[in-house]
Amino acid sequence: MTPAPVDTWLLVDAGNTRVKWALADAAAPLGSWLAQGAMAHGLLDTLIAEWQAAQAEQGRVPARVLAANVAGGGVRAAIEGALRVCAPGAALEWFTSLPWRAGVLNGYANPAQLGCDRFAAAIGARALAPGRNIVIANCGTATTVDAVTADGRFIGGMILPGLRLMSGALARNTAQLPQIDAGTVLPPVFADNTHDAILSGCLAAQAGAIGRAVAAHGGATCIISGGAAPLIAPVLAVPARHVDNIVMLGLHAALLAGGMDETC
């Protein structure tokens, strides 16, 4: 028998490469998950089984779902199809970038054009470091480096190719594709072979962008997240707090803050 919906939330972060999710008790503190998971887009056909297993183990079906999607219509359709099976009674909201939400004022020239993942990450960072100037570096398929002021204004940021994209672009012309994963050994700054030189240069470019943003934002608190963060964080010249999945934390913070508010 399928459990009845209870005061439980399902958070979904559909990024360019993977779909991450977390199940949270509505009364739990920020970042406290009952269950969580992640899968590549090519494995989305297993999403129903994974969610059903988590719900059966916890004895809960979510009453509310908040999902951020930057991966396009196909991924959105797959998530919606899984929810029709796993949580047919849940209230589903697709997270979008609003002028104001959860204590963050969206300062983009056109607030709706800000990527919803970047807005969620700003909300998450603000919840983790309230009252501080913050730089959020989210290092995934693309690397985004964004700034939030101490009073909660998202003032903008920068987007550059992620570490794998950047190294791949160079390697296509050198036949020296670096293997980049969580176990990659960091090369010396001055590498003695092309493979390591590509990786060293790309790490320096990523770290330099983040360091420049921190300096421009008055020595702000830096939060780094994303799949490439374990490689980039050790080469930063500025202190940084490594946070797993800042977008998911932002979605959670948005729900903990209550309803949507487009005014300030």
Image (cartoon, rainbow, N blue to C red):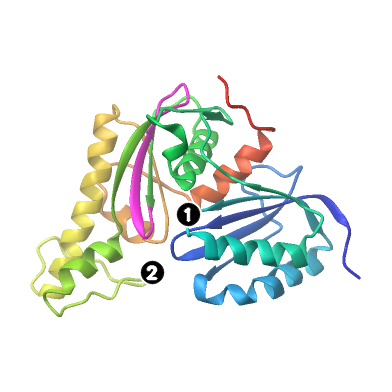
Q: Is residue 37 above or below residue 261?
A: below
| x and y percentages locating residue 125 in the rendered image | 48, 38
Quadrant into which the N terminus falls: bottom right
Q: Could one spot residue 36 in this view of the protein?
A: no
The numbered mark at residue 70 is 1
What predominant SS class does the magenta segment belong to? Answer: strand
Looking at the rendering, the stretch of residues picked out in magenta corresponds to 139-154
- Mark closer to the observer (1, 2): 1
Describe residue 258's horizontal placement relative to residue 124 as left or right. Answer: right
Q: Is residue 80 above or below residue 124?
A: below
Kindly identify the amino acid type of the residue bearing the numbered disc 1.
Val
Looking at the image, which residue is at 51% across and 28% down?
99
Q: Which residue is mark 2?
A: 182
- The magenta stretch spans residue 146: yes
- The magenta stretch spans residue 61: no
Looking at the image, which residue is at 49% across and 65% down?
18
Work out whether residue 72 or residue 156 is closer to the camera in this orientation and state it.
72
